[in-house]
């Protein structure tokens, strides 16, 4: 299940689906996705599907993790500080942490955050800070960020996230309700203007407000 061949098969699939960034493909092949799942599901960890992580939430499909990471890396100039909204299992967090110097991640469900923290520690990823909060407000004390990646979908792009983008900062975010689209939004220099590109239809859990213990 955790064999190098199983993981290589996943990487091959991702590149067939159009993921081309070699760094991203390497990290996807190196990251043990099975430790981000409960034992009963861990045998399915290297399938290219979203999987439940409890509390009605899901670990995103590997393709979408790879794709969002690739889009973020490709669109950003310097990428030193990245904010993730929706830590969930911590899988996307750990992929980011292997590619950028400093990752901040916010999760509204405390038990999910606790488990994610353990997994990141287990992998020795020390360049991540986690916060239990409503990530719709970003993490103002730690901003501005070079990149922000949301793994939960708001109906509209939160103004707070745009405000926390630094010069030429990049936001990758699913937006919508029953139908959603993945958007790439880039701050134009240090202006208050943003350029938006619609990438592809996606299906994420909703960005909810408030926190749960
Ligand atoms: N990146 C995660 C995906 C988890 S699903 C992974 O790789 O496993 C999206 C996550 O966003 C869920 O854990 C959900 O609880 C969280 N979420 C939803 N709304 C949120 C909000 N307002 N603030 C922070 N996290 C939120």
Image (tube, helix red, strand yellow):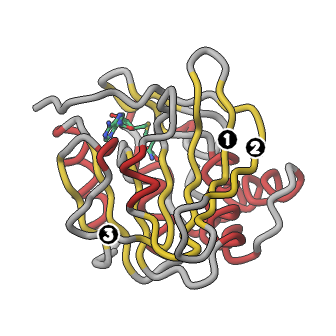
Is 58 or 148 nearer to us in this picture?
Answer: 148
Rendered residue at 89%/53% (across/down): 16
Image position of 20 with respect to 85: above or below = below
Residue 198 is labelled as 2
> In the rendered image, which residue does mark 1 sit on?
182
Image position of 102 with respect to 70: above or below = below
Residue 143 is labelled as 3
Spatial CA span between label 1 and label 3: 23 Å
Contact flag, marks 1 and 3 (Cβ < 8 Å): no
Residue 114 x/y as whole percent: 18, 48
Residue 150 x/y as whole percent: 48, 47
* Viewport quadrant of the C terminus: top left
Spatial CA span between label 2 and label 3: 25 Å
Which image quarter: residue 44? Answer: top right
Rendered residue at 60%/60% (across/down): 193
Looking at the image, in which quadrant does ligand 1 appear?
top left
Spatial CA span between label 2 and label 1: 6 Å
Taking the view exactly as shown, the residue that stands out farthest to the top is 178
Residue 11 x/y as whole percent: 75, 59
Secondary element under disc 1, as helix, strand or loop, is strand
Q: Earlier in the sequence, mark 2 or mark 3?
A: 3
Task: Name the front one of labels 1 and 3.
Answer: 3
């Amino acid at each position: 299940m955790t064999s190098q061949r199983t993981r290589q098969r996943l990487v091959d699939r991702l590149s067939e689906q159009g993921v081309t960034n070699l760094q991203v493909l390497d990290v996807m092949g190196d990251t043990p996705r099975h430790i981000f799942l409960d034992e009963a599901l861990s045998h399915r960890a290297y399938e290219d599907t979203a999987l439940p992580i409890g509390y009605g939430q899901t670990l995103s499909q590997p393709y979408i993790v790879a794709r969002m990471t690739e889009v973020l890396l490709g669109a950003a100039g310097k990428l030193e500080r990245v904010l993730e909204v929706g830590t969930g299992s911590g899988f996307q967090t750990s992929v980011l942490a292997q590619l950028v110097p400093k990752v901040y991640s916010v999760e509204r469900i405390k038990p999910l955050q606790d488990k994610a923290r353990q997994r990141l520690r287990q992998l020795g990823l020390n360049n991540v800070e986690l916060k239990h909060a409503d990530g719709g407000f970003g993490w103002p004390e730690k901003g501005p960020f070079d990149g922000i990646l949301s793994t939960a979908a708001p109906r509209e792009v939160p103004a707070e996230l745009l405000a926390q983008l630094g010069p030429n900062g990049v936001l990758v975010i699913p937006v919508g309700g029953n139908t959603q689209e993945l958007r790439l939004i880039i701050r134009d220099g240090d202006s208050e203007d943003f350029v938006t590109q619609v990438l592809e239809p996606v299906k994420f859990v909703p960005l909810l407000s408030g926190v749960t213990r």
